[in-house]
Image (spheres, grey):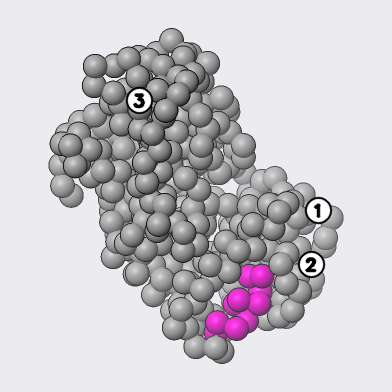
Amino acid sequence: MAAHAPLHWDVFCRVVDNFGDIGVCWRLAADLAARGQAVRLWTDDASALAWMAPGGAAGVQVCEWAASELAEPADVVVEAFACDPPDAFVARMARRTVPPLWLNLEYLSAEDWVERCHDLPSPRLAGPGQGLVKHFFHPGFTPRTGGLLREPGLLERRDAFDRSAWLAAHGIAPRAGERVVTLFCYPDAPLPRLWQVLAGTPTLVLLTPGAAQALAARHAPPPGVRLHALPYLTQSDFDHLLWSGDVNLVRGEDSAVRAMWAGVPFVWQLYPQHDGAHDAKLAAFLDRFLDGVPPAVATPLRAWWRAWNGVGGDGAGVWPEPAAWRDVCLAWRARLAAQADLTTQLLGWAERRRAGG
């Protein structure tokens, strides 16, 4: 791993969804710190970190959002998902002798426009921060984007993982012949469709806290499907949960990326948007994910993903053959792993900008 000059980073995160925005920002902050950077994570709600990262991380300081109004800006300022740091902080950024590098870390999308917009500058022409330039940094699935979060050694740890030991340590005991399905979803997930596709095969469903457990309490599973309610898990153990599944149903950005690194069959429920924008995002992702996949596998996957995301009603009762589905996911993971990860790209971007590039 290449060494990078140590810098101070400010990462700003407003919490819209405790499991999503703060999850991405914490992984980024911890990964930057593990690579020798100093990081302050400014957030308006750090409550989820109590179970997500109870031990904290060396080199990461979690700070109250409001306190940033009196803070001296760091070398690099990352505003996650267009959260807009306080005006007083931005004004001090502009007054620094060497202005901070400033970027907006965008939401994840596979749409074509992401490649065109990645690293585009946005000059601040008026108001607080006049004279500064903010850049748009887009995570993505192609070499012309900012990549995905992937800590050094993640895939090696995945390969060495002992599924049976982890499940046993957490009081989870699959029966002989049972497949393990993990469920992390939004409240509008069509759970009866999942029960339909699971019916007829012995299955243990591991329910994450929140929507999954609430939905399961309202919709009884079919015969042969057992349920196990999980507690809140640290980010590390959430990764281990996904490594333990035979099929992982995940929601939002952070868990979807971790499901991709798990290398097992997965279904992604995108964040639902009232204007239907998640339909276009889903279609763009499936076009990339299923590119070159034989129709016998691609057709049921596309239909089921669309049904699970509420943008199509057909084909919801069938999944492809497990081994073929797993091969698709492993091939996808290999394509992603061949690209530079997001933190590596951020560090390189900062160094080039510092050098005038």
**Callout 3 amino acid:** Gly
In percent of width and height, residue 96 lies at: 29, 16
Horizontal arrangement in the rendering, residue 29 relative to residue 19 (left or right): left
In percent of width and height, residue 102 lies at: 36, 32
Horizontal arrangement in the rendering, residue 232 relative to residue 6 (left or right): right
Q: Is residue 144 above or below residue 5?
A: below
- Residue 217, label in figure: 1
Marks 2/3: CA–CA distance: 54 Å
- Magenta span main SS: helix
Report which residue position mark 3 lands on.
Answer: 131
Q: Is residue 122 above or below residue 193?
A: above
Q: Is residue 161 magenta?
A: no
Q: Residue at x 41, y 22 (%)?
A: 129
Give whichever of discs 2 and 3 has the lower sequence position. 3
> Dot 1 lies on which element?
helix
In percent of width and height, residue 299 lies at: 60, 83
Q: Residue at x 35, y 20 (%)?
A: 93
**Front residue of this view, candidates 316 and 221:** 316
Report which residue position mark 2 lands on.
Answer: 192
* Mark 3 touches mark 1? (CB < 8 Å): no
Marks 3/1: CA–CA distance: 55 Å
Q: Nearer the viewer's eye, disc 2 or disc 1?
A: 2
Q: Which residues are magenta?
A: 297-306
